[in-house]
Amino acid sequence: MSAPQAAYRIDGALVAPEAFYRAACDPRRSVVVEACAGAGKTWMLVSRIVRALLDGAEPQQILAITFTRKAAGEMRERLNEWLAEFAQADAAKRIAELRLRGCTASEAEALAPALCALDERLLALGRAVEIRTFHGWFSQLLRAAPLGALEALGLSPDPDLLEERDDLRADYTRRFLAAVADDLAAREDYAALVREHGRHRVEQWIESALDQRTEIERAAAAGTLAGSVPPAAALWPAFDGLATPAAALARVHVPLLAPSLATAALLVFVDVLKELPATLALRPFNFDTLAVEAYNLAKDERLAEAATPSLAIVAAGLLPLIYVSKRYFQATRS
């Protein structure tokens, strides 16, 4: 058995990968697996389905639910591919695959013949494992529910499946604005928000509230909605007491941007200092810059005299670069 790795834990304790998969794929255990994207959760779910089928579960007794049709299709495709592969594999291959899915050596040898016949068994039953999306499963429940119960809840037995909320955006926006127009206080509040923050920002806030509509409704019903939203100053103390965007710019943003602006100004200064064509064409303030002076002297072949303004350009450009480099290294170390 390999040494425990930090990537595998059971109830917070480090375990070897074999022990982890033995627990996660055991159909007799209820488990919750937390893992990042690409860690192999789909592999584990389908492996658990295979183990459950080998344990005697009927395919229609297994329900796997995922978020998207794509993920459900991938799970279904992988299960079918595995069953076909196991049916054609030799005994050693089937035992190795079962060992990967948490079986002990003796369990793998005992289950290998059943794994070989599993594809044929499911085909003979004519029933498939239920692998669905959340919304597909809920639609199936609605279609199977008593009509009286659905009518009491105001639900349709054959609902239209809505894939994207944007499909209803025009409808619910129109209904929202109609409700605001019918309420004087709401209309005044909405108009004040639009005047102060702009229509686009207000629409963004409404969309954010719609995303959290269930939480907002429950908080409002419990009478805790107002207290559940902390004041802005509690979240962003730097903005406390700032009444206008200009005040926020002066107190918060300018201090944050000042080092970057100073660095940019120094780099522009160095670039302009050595830039001959622009300064020669513009002749700023009717006097020659160091670059123009060096050019004129060099053009007249007075190279010794041209060295002084040239070295001055190098010295003037080095100082800002040394300062910028020092600030950069200090920032990277901190």
Image (spheres, grey):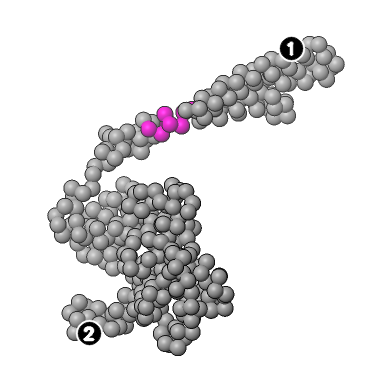
Q: Which mark is residue 308?
A: 1
Which sits in the foreground, 331 or 296? 331
Which residues are the magenta region?
252-259
Magenta-colored stretch includes residue 243: no
Q: Is residue 268 above or below residue 46?
A: above
**Is residue 164 toward the left or the right of residue 280 in the image?**
left
Residue at 47% x, 57% y: name it.
Answer: 39
Q: Secondary structure at mark 2?
A: loop
Which sits in the foreground, 73 or 53? 53
Residue at 72% x, 15% y: name it.
Answer: 311
**Residue receiving disc 2:** 146
Within 10 Å of disc 1 (Cα), the crowding (few <14, some 14-19, many 20+) is few
User: Which amino acid is tagged 2?
Assistant: Pro
User: Which amino acid is tagged 1?
Assistant: Thr
Looking at the magenta stretch, what is its main secondary structure?
Answer: helix
The x and y percentages for residue 31 are 33, 62
The x and y percentages for residue 286 are 67, 20
Residue at 61% x, 23% y: name it.
Answer: 321
Which sits in the foreground, 108 or 316? 108
